[in-house]
Amino acid sequence: MEISAERQKSIHHRFDAFCKKAMRYEARNCYKEISRKQQREVSLDYLIEEHFFAPRSVDDYFIVQPMQDIPTNFHINGQVVAIENEHLATALLHLSAEKRELILLHYFLGLKMQDIAVLYNRAHNTISHRKYRTLKSLRKEMERLEYEEAQLQTAAI
């Protein structure tokens, strides 16, 4: 089936009109976005005049950093697990020995829940449930420690 020349011309004109309309809408969207950005943006010169500070950047690559936390070591099944995060190590120390071992075995030594269940001579579901309860109490303990530290920092200021 062949399209007549008049029909082809009509299609061509409609396509041109569609393209022009699409370009008009896109230009309108660009202008709107530019005006939104201009309303929200603040000139850097204005900020400098407002706060009286000189813009600068300071690199601290070569500043001597304080010593990193000394890792806390936990001995589990003849292996040593070193925890460098002070909050996590303290929170783990507040847990009972069995709960601490469960977390360390699963998350740090990579044992599967089935293997831990065999090790403790318990059902898989029991170990899984204990793990979730222990994680919940560990999270609460870490939040408590962070809150206490924040309180000490604000009191020091």
Image (tube, grey):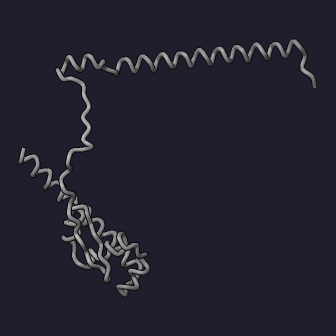
Give the residue at the far bottom of this rendering: 121
Q: Position of residue 148 (x, y in %)?
A: 13, 55
Give the residue at the far right of this rendering: 1
Quadrant assignment, res 124 = bottom left
Above or below, 28 relative to 57 = above
In the visual, does 47 lie left or right of 38?
left
Residue at point 69% right, 14% down?
Answer: 17
The N terminus - image quarter: top right
Above or below, 66 relative to 43 = below
Q: Position of residue 95 (x, y in %)?
A: 22, 72
- Residue 28 versus residue 149: which sits nearer the camera? 149
Residue at point 40% right, 77% down?
Answer: 125
Q: Position of residue 140 (x, y in %)?
A: 23, 61
Quadrant assignment, res 97 = bottom left
The number of numbered badges drawn on the structure is 0
The C terminus - image quarter: top left
Give the residue at the far front of this rendering: 62
Quadrant assignment, res 56 = top left
Residue at point 24% right, 63% down?
Answer: 88
In the visual, does 151 lie left or right of 103?
left
In the visual, does 143 lie left or right of 81?
left
In the visual, does 99 lie left or right of 30?
left
Residue at point 30% right, 67% down?
Answer: 135
